[in-house]
Image (cartoon, rainbow, N blue to C red):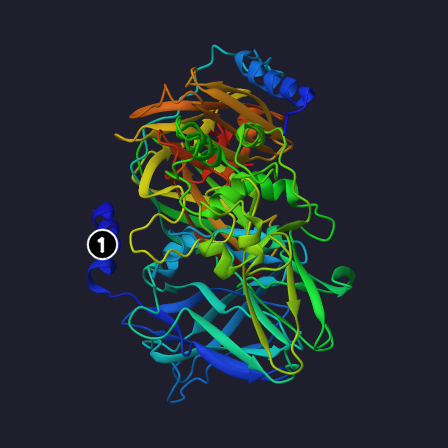
Amino acid sequence: MKKLFLLLSLLLPAQISAQPEVYLETNAITANRGDTIEIWANFNNNSTQTRTIYFDFSYQRTAFSLIDVSFATAGADTSAIPTGATTSLTNLNFVGFNWVQTTANTTTNGLTNYQNMQYAYTSGGPYTIRRLYGTVALPTNTNLGTGRFMKLKFEVQNTAHDFVYDSLYMNFAFANSNNAGWLATNNAVSTGYRSAFFTISGGTAEVLIYGTLDLPSSVNINHLQPRLKFFEKYNNVPDTLRHTESVGSNGTFSVTPSEVDTDTDYRIYLSLGGPNGDSIPSILNTAITVSDFTAAETEFSWQSLTTGNFIDTLFTKGVHYMAADINDSRGFDPGDTGTLFAQVAGVETVEMTDTSQMLLKSVFDTVSTAYWRVTDSILDTQSGGPYGMDFHTDTTATDTLNLKYFIPGDVNLSYSSALTVNTPGAQAAPVLANIFIDVNLNNLVVTTNSIEIPFEVSTGDQEISALQFEVLYDPSKLRFETMDLGVSSWIAFIDNKVGQVRFGAIDRSREFALSGDFTPFSLKFVTVNNPLDIVTQLHLTSNMDASSKSGHQIGITLNSNTIRLIGYNNYANPGS
Amino acid sequence: MQIPVHKIKLLTSIVLILGCTFDPVDPFDINENITFDLGEVPQSTKIVSVEIDALTKTTITLNMDVTVGAMYTIHLLHLLGGDPLAVTGFTVTTQFTTVQLDYSNISNGLYDIVLIDTQGNSTKIPLLLER
């Protein structure tokens, strides 16, 4: 009977109660630097007995300072909090953390988003996570209503004129009720918003040059660190570095008359990887993956035997060939494919200075496969060549400069600017759109010192010829030992650093492409301490890639990007 | 551009290494003959409710909907992850199981309680300790 009541108590709330809702009252606020901004998080009780609401917000702490959090006045007309209520707040700040959006944690259910939360941490980073845990004590037989619940008050910081603002995000908000515990909670389903953008004006200096650098959606701006270097020209030669302008996370930049002179000749270069180019090896490893090699080698091997010309099967635009010309010979030759393969395999053969290939957007999108080698065709529209750009500043008017770039070896432009293709249905890159293979990763209960992690692949009918992944692990708990290869006819590679292993395999001859279900890799680790006590996780980074038999890049669908390893004692022992 | 010979050698050595396998020695002396019984395959991993002892505010009662015969572990974590502050394992004898957790040595604050089964499935709830 006791079980029956418990069962009923579990089922009843799900059957008779609707979900509460939490939402932001507005999604757009305009303010000046130095102003305060108030934004309300509102609540729709929807017949629940909610007593606590748990929030997670992220925002740019360098632009907005949270100076106060308060509850709506109990009993006020607009308030969700009734007369006689008392409130309490737990307010926690996690500087440098930012929410990582995934499909699983951007749903309209705040409880689901909480269950699937993911964060990235950057020491001293510009974002912060604010956790707010608001509790109300209500008079007997009283519940929350519908209306304002909690107010966040920000002060706008005195940011630079070209600071790129981001929104305030309510990553999750969910409710706890007296009778049913933590509740599935709608976040801005029927009304309101889950994020708010603050438009900041005032104090903006006059802008002489405004422009954009087209960034791919996958880019990590702290990784790429794109900056434009303005060299003043004397006798038509770039001579003195006058200004370095950082490009914002949305790709925009602006330069003021105090930074460069009016009516003056400059040559502009794009610099990637930080002031000393420290991130360049990592950028190359992110940008150049197995499908770049398979695409390049396929295009190269299919050239016409009679004319020696390439037939532009995968490389449909001139910029593909420009990216493939790794050795900068102004031709696409065996040296390029060999260098590309070595780079993919972990031997860092691709050379890139901190001055990268930057083109005017109009040139990048239109340079043809026939004329990409003809330097004059680029100089006709872009004086300064593919590595720089000559530019003359106006006297007063604001100039607009729209730019794109590519990374040497990134032939499918996965970490470079995207091609804009005017012809409907035309292929923008050597990529098979909407074709995915599945990769399954399983959590493990650890019972031995040696741990084997299989990567189970399911391709369906799609034949694949290359795969690569990258795994991060905690070196204080695990040591990488080796990798078992399940595709023995392919050429494998491993690039193992402390806490990070990048690995993959390529069917270079394209004779042993595989389809169906198979296990191409099994990673083997040993535990540093007693395996029965271990609690750790392996994380797959976004640096993964797959290629079809035809050399095109195809997508990968993971069942999880985390592999959880938990020692047996954590299950068997009642306490520690 | 030619690939330098030393890099070709390095690449070859990387490939050759793959053909070798280690036979790692277990320094923790775990008896290979021991069979670790992981119990039944979990079908349910749910936290129904949590109660904090009103008097001491250190004893937490966790009510769960779990699978009889399956093994689970409960972790107390800082909000944004990291190593668990407390770990409690148990094997289920009734579907609606209650476990009492002694968090008297845990300082005041906001935490996550995470219930994890042997398949790695998990669910979590917030826990506010205020004394």
Identity of the residue drawn at 53% across and 25% down: A532
Tally the marks: 1
Residue drawn 57% across the image and 49% down it: A375
Residue B111 vertical placement versus A46 (above, below): above
Residue ID for mark 1: A11
Q: Residue furthest bottom?
A: A77
Task: Please state the chain letter of the residue tagged with numbered disc 1 in the rendered image.
Answer: A
Pick whichever, B123 or A27, lies toward us.
A27
**Which element type, helix, strand or loop, lies under badge 1?**
helix
Q: Amino acid at mark 1?
A: Leu
Return the x and y of residue A195 as percentages of the image width and height: 44, 69
* In the image, residue A520 above or below residue A475: above
User: Residue A473, image x and y in percent?
Assistant: 57, 35
Looking at this rendering, what residue extends furthest in the front direction? Answer: A307
Q: Residue B129: horizontal and vertical position, in percent?
A: 54, 58
Could you say which quadrant of the image residue A435 lies in?
Answer: top left
Quick one: quadrant of the C terminus of chain B?
bottom right
User: Where's residue A342, x and y in %?
Assistant: 58, 28
Compared to A47, does B44 lie above or below?
A: above
